[in-house]
Amino acid sequence: MTALLYRATYFAAFLFCRALLLVSTIFGLFLFIIKLPLSLVLPIKLLFWVFLYFVWTEQRLKQRLIFYYNLGLSKKVLFYVAFLYDLLLTIGLNLILYWFLK
């Protein structure tokens, strides 16, 4: 977990999860449109990231993670940081949309 102390960890995790963040953001906007409260959106997104974690543990998808393993990042750290990015993005977008669409 000492990898969380390095700035390169966050950049590499962003490179890893940028496409997943786009899908998760669109999903979060859909949940906002159907007016789910933020207290329900966050656990749903947590389940989404847990599902993605188990999908990425499949053997053929593990090969894509070799670059991150060489940087010293484990799957858990990658998904933890990706979830934190998603959490910040979701809360920020929900607050902005709530203020402007109120």
Image (cartoon, rainbow, N blue to C red):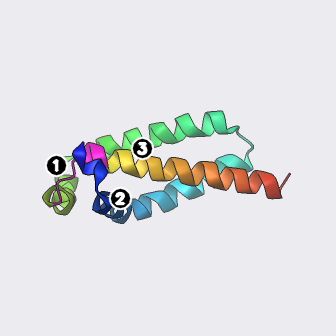
Q: CA distance from mark 1 to mark 2?
A: 25 Å
Residue at 30% across, 40% down: 54
Q: Which residues are magenta?
A: 71-77
The picture places residue 97, in percent across and down from the top left corner, at 74, 56
Q: Name the residue that disc number 1 marks.
A: 59
Residue that label 3 marks: 49
Disc sitting over residue 10 in the figure? 2
Badge 3 density bin: few <14, some 14–19, many ≥20, Cα 10 Å: some
The residue lying furthest to the right in this view is 102
Residue in the image at 46% along x and 42% along y: 48
Of the numbered discs 1 and 2, the one sitting upstream in the chain is: 2
Q: How far apart are the two marked residues, 2 and 3, measured between alpha carbons?
A: 17 Å
- Labels 1, 2: front one: 2
Task: Report the side of 65 relative to 53 (left or right).
Answer: left
Give the residue type at disc 3.
Answer: Trp
Task: Give neighbour class at mark 1: few <14, some 14-19, many 20+ (Cα, 10 Å).
Answer: few
Is residue 61 rendered to the left or right of residue 12? Answer: left
